Amino acid sequence: MSTEPQTVMIVEILPTKIWIENGMCGERIVVVQHQGMPPFDYAVFNYGYGYTSNSTTWDDAIRVAKSIGATEPIEMKSRELRFQKPDEIRQQIALLEQELAWTEQKNAEGETP
C-alpha cells in the first residue's frame, strides 16, 4: 500500500446558500443549496410542546447553520406550503403498488421482507 500523497485538483467550488425556514407546525429547517442544485433540508428541528420550545429550536437551528458555514445575518424564510400535483401523486401510488406486490410475493414465498 503506497503512502505517497496524491495530487487532487479542485475544478470548481459551487457557491452555497444556507438559510432557516419556519414551518407551519413550529419546526425549524436548516436548508442548504449549492448553485444550480435544488435546496436540501440539512436538519429539521421539530416542535413538540412537551419536549421543545421555540427558543431552543431557534438556537439549535442557528448553531447548526453556523456550523456548516452560515454567516450572520442568517436569512429566515417561512416554509412554503406545497401541494403535490396529480401526476406526482400517481407516481408515488405506482411505486407503492410495486412495493406492495414485492412484499406480498415475499410473504407468499415464506420470506419476511
Image (cartoon, rainbow, N blue to C red):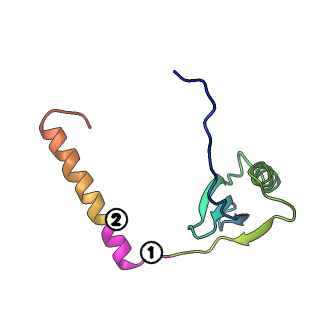
Magenta stretch: includes residue 10 = no
Q: Please give the range of residues in magenta.
A: 83-91
| Principal secondary structure, stretch drawn in magenta | helix
Badge 1 amino acid: Gln
The quadrant in which residue 39 appears is: bottom right
Among numbered discs 1 and 2, the one appearing first in the sequence: 1
Disc 2 designates what residue? 92
Q: Is residue 26 above or below residue 9?
A: below
The quadrant in which residue 85 appears is: bottom left
Say whether residue 85 is visible.
yes
Circles 1 and 2 in contact, beta carbons < 8 Å: yes
Which residue is depicted at the point 82% across and 52% down? 59
Q: Residue furthest right?
A: 72
- 17 vs 3, left or right, is right
The quadrant in which residue 96 appears is: bottom left
Disc 1 designates what residue? 84
Q: In the image shown, does 109 or 67 lie closer to the viewer?
A: 67
Q: In the image shown, does 38 or 100 lie closer to the viewer?
A: 38
Which residue is depicted at the point 34% across and 77% down? 87
**Quarter containing the C terminus:** top left
